[in-house]
Image (cartoon, grey):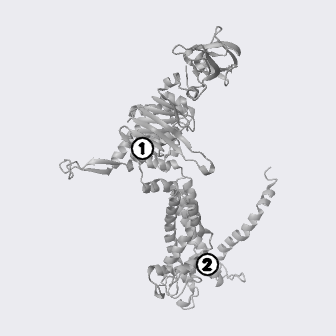
Amino acid sequence: MEIRLKHLTKIFPGNPKKNIPDTHAVEDLNLTIPDGKLYALLGPSGCGKSTTLNMIAGLSEPSSGEIWFGDEDVTDLSPEKRGIGLVFQNYALYPHMTVYKNVAFPLTNLRVEEKVKDANGNDVLDEEGKPLVKKRKLTKIEIDKLVRETSKIVQIEEYLWRKPSQLSGGQQQRVAIARALVKHPRVLLLDEPLSNLDARLRLQTREEIRRIQKSTGITTIFVTHDQEEAMSISDEIVVMKLGVEQQAGIPQEVYNEPANRFVANFLGTPPINFFHGEIRGNKIYIGDAMVKEITDKTLPDQKVTVGIRPEGIVPSEKGVLPFHIDQIITQGRDIIIQGDHPLETRPCKFVVDAFTDVKVGDIHCEVKPHKCFAFSLEGNEERIA
Amino acid sequence: MIKKNNWKGWLYLAPIIILMAVFTFYPLISTFSIAFMKDYDYIKQTSAGFTFDNFAIVLGLAPTNPEAPVELQGYVTDVVRYAIPNTAIITFVTVPLSIIIALAIAVGLNSIPKFQKIFQTIFFIPYVTNSIAVGMVFAVLFDYNGIVNFLLGTMGREYAWIDLGAPTWKAMIALCIYIIWSSLPFKILIFLSGLAGIDKQYYDAAKIDSAGKFKTLMHVTVPLLSPQILYVMITSFIGAFKEYDSVVGLLGKPGTDATKNMYTVVYYIYDTISQNNVHYGSAAAVLLFVVILAFTGIQFWVSKKRVHY
């Protein structure tokens, strides 16, 4: 099911009497979420990602704009008619029901349409000659079958008779996913699905979500503020800031070619390093050090912010960029060197290979051109090179 | 170390301990001991010795005054004839009804977005109103020429609810309505505070799972509110077993006349004081205590599986 958001806007009205302005939680959002893909809405808190998810779910009404599921406009459809499964941030498992009952609960409300058959097994026709369709509840056996099928996918069969309070966070998470999946929704929505888990479980569960999504092939949208989480499991991401889409695309492409300073800053750990720099003669300079030559276009001389990814330098005697190392943090696989440069905007962190011979003190480094960007100082601080 | 300064702790506790000793523990122990005293005279503080007869007499198993003719053996048998059935009716009618009504009102109040605070205040007014005063208002409403009969189109003495000539069942209806009405505010308050503590996400989840309003109420709200429901149930059963001031408030003392008898167990207990029959009253109080204790115990036992904390 392809999902399209057209000019989606959500405004929370303020109070003019008390001088509280309107809050534009989501502003003119246009997105196409491809069928069968895992899609991440990514951004810091307050960026409108959860509001967007709630609007897709139907729990929150858009101020304007449209939501399409495939060929169907669902903007005005109530949540239960949209055919969605939603996993809440704190799971919202009913504490008084066993896991089995929790998973079965959506099914007990479900009505399936079935053609009415006569004694010979032929369709009964109505006055217009169409097959007569009757709505009916699922039988206990059908429910049981679906519950067991879904429990198998998310691997909670052992805990079916426990109460949610007797489960660990990760198990509760899987139960919540099972409850969302059991009625075979058209879309699975996950609201910050991993934020209540500890670090190890988070890694494990995100793989799990990826696996479940792959095996069911269901279009899945998930909201997160953790860029690593989003990048590692999603097919596509959109980065949002203050209700406005910043950039959408395949995670690696967004990382490699950030549209603006915000996106560059938001993606990557440790974060990108920024320097006050300038463009002179189509070359990017930090102070006197020429760090990158622009080859694909011609830009006028101007002051810019230069961003260098932490993995974007190689310490070298011949290097152009001087750098003072304050601290060396050993990580095993690699080393983080932390230090300053006179033109930095904040203390820099670079990641270098574990076998690199570095000591606290002054060094020089070479800059990898494809890890180095220039951002305009004006407007939305777009990347210009 | 701890023992050294122990007297300080007792000193801090002294005010409440003294108050409780005088007004709670002493009366409690006295009640239990007087219940087993024969012909106790509370003015002279004398008794004719230890006996179990008080309980038998209260329950109508033994005559008060074996020498007198049966019809003159006093009001004690009224306990069996009137007080126990009346108290049972009051308890098992008003408690379930008032809980259901209070729950409905609380859920309703919780779901209206506007004027919620105003309505909460309005519904809370009966709680802060003197029950005798409320009883008098209800007495006017249920007067044989009152508003209730006016609305029913049945004015006149022959249609009396609570006045002389009214049958017991009609007076009981009026009494139950009055008791339910005056017990609602506290219950609504408890339920509203419970509802406020239920995470809104459960309702969002139920909505997405396409559970209807009633199903959501029965499968989400009520189970999640079960601790509050249990609390309200136990306190209201205890209160209903002890119903007394409502009878006085609505029907005036003694609530008894030629056509009806609205005696309750606690009414009887108070009545024995004026008759200098405190030993019967104490025996009845002990019996009532045992019944309430047993009933509360049963509720806790049943609720173990049904209440989800």
Query: Is residue A273 toward the left or the right of residue B199 in the image?
Result: right
Using the image, tell me which numbered label, if any, was put on residue B269. 2
Nearest the eye: A277 or A316: A277
Q: Nearer the viewer, residue A167 or A371?
A: A371
Q: Secondary structure at mark 2?
A: helix
Q: Nearer the viewer, residue B133 or A242?
A: A242
Confirm whether residue A327 shows in the render: no
Q: Is residue B18 above or below residue B271?
A: above
Asked whether the beta carbons under mark 2 and mark 1 sit within 8 Å of each other, the answer is no
Q: Which residue is situated farthest in the top direction here?
A: A318
Name the residue furthest left.
Answer: A120
Q: Nearer the viewer, residue B293 or B246?
A: B246
Q: Position of residue B208 (x, y in %)?
A: 43, 47
Q: In the figure, is residue A357 to the left or right of B224?
A: right
What chain letter is assigned to the residue under label 2? B
Q: Residues within 10 Å of mark 1 (few under 14, many from 20)?
A: many
Spatial distance from mark 2 to mark 1, Cα to Cα?
Answer: 67 Å
Q: List x then y, in percent, for residue A28.
A: 49, 37
Amino acid tagged 1:
Thr
On the image, numbered disc 1 is attached to which residue? A75
Residue A25 placement (x, y as % from top left)? 54, 41
Quarter that holds the C terminus of chain A: top right
Q: In which quarter of the view is residue B45 placed?
A: bottom right
> In the displayed structure, does residue A56 sit left or right of residue B262?
left
Q: What amino acid is at disc 2?
A: Ile
Dot 2 crowding, Cα within 10 Å, few <14, some 14–19, many 20+:
many
Between circles 2 and 1, the one closer to the viewer is 1
Chain assignment, label 1? A
Query: Same chain for marks 2 and 1?
Result: no
Q: Is residue B286 visible?
A: yes
Q: Quadrant of the N terminus of chain A?
A: top left
